[in-house]
Image: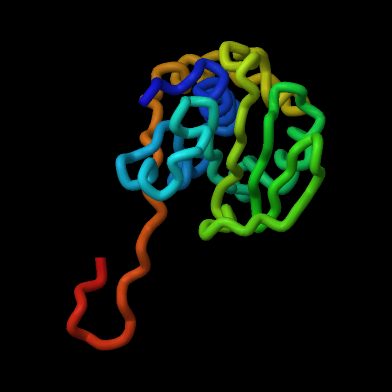
């Protein structure tokens, strides 16, 4: 497994610097062992993908970001709310098991792996202290998609 690319890390850090109160519960960069097994071809495996938590209340509205990132030449494809977009195919129905309702999946083109220029150029620049704090944030590991607990009886523990 590779490490996360500078561009993928930059997306999360820039989002946090711009909107420091944003939720990060569904953020992800590198895959866990379970995610590797579930999706061996994921761009998370090469460090070229990032999941950004959808948190419109605190300023990270992935509906808006999904639409704006379509015009960013660094983006390979996007997945959000049951849709997958790429420049070649446009918007299509996403048929994967995780519909990406809680986060936006952003896959980055190989040639843009080291591009840390602003991803959220339409937003104001962050306050310097927020940019500093975001730069010190540890990058999250991609979690495997949760397996829902059994609801057939009361014998199985809810985790």
Name the image quarter holding residue 117: top right
Residue 37: give x, y in percent of width and height.
Answer: 36, 46
Please tell me which residue lies in front, 61 or 5.
5
Please tell me which residue lies in front, 132 or 156.
156
Residue 89: give x, y in percent of width and height.
Answer: 80, 42
**Vertical relation: 71 (above or below) 132:** below
Name the image quarter holding residue 8: top right
**Vertical relation: 9 (above or below) 80:** above
Please tell me which residue lies in front, 103 or 43.
43
Name the residue: 36% across, 68% down.
148
**Vertical relation: 68 (above or below) 95:** above
Tell whether 156 sits left or right of 30.
left
Can residue 137 be seen here? The reply is yes
Tell whether 121 sits left or right of 128.
right
Name the residue: 49% across, 44% down.
23
Q: Residue extending furthest bottom?
A: 153
Quarter of the picture containing the N terminus is top left
Name the residue: 59% across, 47% down.
54
Can residue 143 be seen here? The reply is no
Please tell me which residue lies in front, 40 or 57.
40
Colour mode of the rendering: rainbow
Residue 65: give x, y in percent of width and height.
Answer: 71, 39
Quarter of the picture containing the C terminus is bottom left
Residue 145: give x, y in percent of width and height.
Answer: 41, 54
**Vertical relation: 150 (above or below) 153:** above
Name the residue: 58% across, 48% down.
55
Tell whether 88 sits left or right of 131.
right
Name the image quarter holding residue 154: bottom left
């Amino acid at each position: 497994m590779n490490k996360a690319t500078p561009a993928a890390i930059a997306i999360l850090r820039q989002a946090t610097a711009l909107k420091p109160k944003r939720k990060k519960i569904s953020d992800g960069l590198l895959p866990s062992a379970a995610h590797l097994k579930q999706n061996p071809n994921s761009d998370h495996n090469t460090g070229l993908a990032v999941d950004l938590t959808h948190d419109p209340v605190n300023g990270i509205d992935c509906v808006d970001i999904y639409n704006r990132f379509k015009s960013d030449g660094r983006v390979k494809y996007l997945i959000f709310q049951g849709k997958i977009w790429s420049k070649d195919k446009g918007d299509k129905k996403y048929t994967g098991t995780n519909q990406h309702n809680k986060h936006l999946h952003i896959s980055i083109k190989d040639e843009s792996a080291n591009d840390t220029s602003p991803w959220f150029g339409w937003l104001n620049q962050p306050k310097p202290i927020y940019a500093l704090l975001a730069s010190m944030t540890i990058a999250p590991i991609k979690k495997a998609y949760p397996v829902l607990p059994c609801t057939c009886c009361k014998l199985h523990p809810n985790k």
